[in-house]
Structures are given as structure tokens and as C-alpha cells.
Image: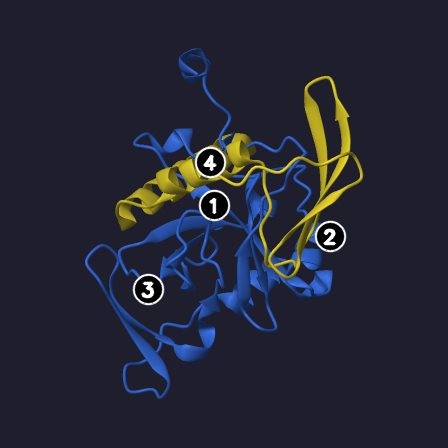
Chain colours: A blue, B yellow
Amino acid sequence: MEDAAEDLTAVVAARDDQDTIDVVSERFGTFAVSADSVLHFPQGPIGFPADRRFVILEHRPGSPFKWLLSLDDPELGFAIANPAELVSGYEPPLALAAQVLEVEEPDIALFVIVTIPSDPRAMTVNLMAPVVVDMRTRRARQLIVEGAKLDPRYPVLELSAEQETER
Amino acid sequence: MLVLTRKVGERIRIGDDVSVQVLEVRGGQVRLGFAAPTEVRIFREEILRTVEGQNAQARLPDPESLSDAAAAWEVFVDGRRS
């Protein structure tokens, strides 16, 4: 799945390339991406129905974190991550993803959305609602995995005793 | 709001391709079965609200927050290795 994620990462294209999309964002800067790297969320992420086109950008080589940026609202961005690197023992719901996307499991890339509070050590990932992508068509969807009691606020870093008390 | 009364086993059709069937009624709870195309998202409302709320919180305020998280992650991984 790690390789899958690499394939999906948008290449920040040179401005004079053909078929590029210019992104101008106050928050995330100005850059261009190749048009064929765009992911399509037919219904948007949950709660963001107007945001249909996104790109995934590398945060830093080797980092488990990536950007998921909206092209429809360039000020909308999420941090996403490959859960295999952040959450030990996590079993990605590939069967459900395959059913919902109507693809075979090897064609799926799966990411979790990371919530980063003011103290980044308290960051959490949403295991209940991963983002899944059909790598062949770049169609994407945010799943909700019902019934499995997956934590929407799973703490990535083991919490200190002090932070535990605050919870 | 449209209100309909149904017996166990009976169905309600919504639009051309969504069907809801009453499967069981017991002790103040109703079990429903849904048949719909995969693009129709069907969730318990409170779970949908949870995910919407979490997504709203996850929206990044700035690029620095991700760099801070990545740095915290690296510190954590280094600590785990040593």
C-alpha cells in the first residue's frame, strides 16, 4: 500500500507543462499540479460536499504524512497518513472499500485523516472514516466503517500520564 | 414529514432505486434493511455527525501544523527505538 500511495502523489509540475492546474492558496502556497494527478470525490469528503477535486502532495520524503488539498477550495486541506506506518495492528477495511468503489482490493489506496490539535503530540487519526482511492480511475471516497467500533480519534502517540489525566 | 405505517416484512421505496424493509420490531427497537446503489451513503445519523465533526476539526489551519505533527512523530519514533 505504501507503493500505492507513492503512485497517487501529485507531481508538482513545472508551470510550462501542458495539462497542469495552477493552485493559488493563501494557506498552502502557489503551485501547479499535473491534471492527471487529480483525485475525484464524487460526493466530497463527509461534510464537504462541494469539494470534489483533491490532490495528494508529499509532505517530506520518507514521512508517513501527506497533504490532501482541495482544488475546489484551495484553503481547504487535511493531513492524511498511511495507517500502516502510524497504527500498529490496524486492519484496513479493504473488503468494504472494494465493495463501495466496485474495484479489486489491490487497486485501492487507503489513508487515514489526521487531526492535529495545538499540541501536536495529541494528534489523532480517524480509523472510523478512512479515505479510499481507486488507483486506476482516481475516484475517491471517504468510507464510514460501521459496527467495528473503530476510534474516530485514535491517539497516534502514546500519551504521557499527564495527558491521560486530561482525557 | 411524511409518516407511513408498515408491518414487519413490508418495504418502502424511496426514488427509483432505494428500498427500505422493516425486518424486526422488538422492545422499542426497529431493525431495517436497506437496498440501494453503492453511491447512496446510508449511515446512522449520530455516526455521520461524529465523522462530520471530526473532519471539521481535522481541517488544517496552516502548513506549519503538519510540520509540527511530523516533528512530534519523529521524536516519538526515535524514543521508541532507543
State how far apart marks 4 and 2 are (Cα): 24 Å
* Residues flagged by tags 1 and 4 on a common chain: no
State the image coordinates of residue A7 (x, y, percent, origin top left). 55, 69
- Measured in 3D between alpha carbons, the distance from the residue under mark 3 to the one under mark 1, in whole angstroms, is 19 Å
Instruction: Identify residue for label 3.
Output: A72
Q: Secondary structure at mark 2?
A: helix
Number of numbered discs present? 4
Farthest residue toward the left?
Answer: A26
Q: Are marks 3 and 2 on the same chain?
A: yes
Dot 1: element: strand
Crowding around mark 3 (Cα neighbors within 10 Å: few <14, some 14 to 19, many 20+) is few
Q: Is residue A17 visible?
A: yes
Question: Residue flagged by tag 2: what amino acid is it?
Answer: Ala
Residue closest to the eye, A88 or B28: B28
Q: Is the N terminus of chain A in the top left, top right, bottom left or bottom right quadrant?
A: bottom right
Q: Label 3: chain? A: A
- Judged from this view, the residue extending furthest toward the right is B9
The residue singled out by tag 1 in the image is A113
Q: Which residue lies under the disc numbered 2? A: A95
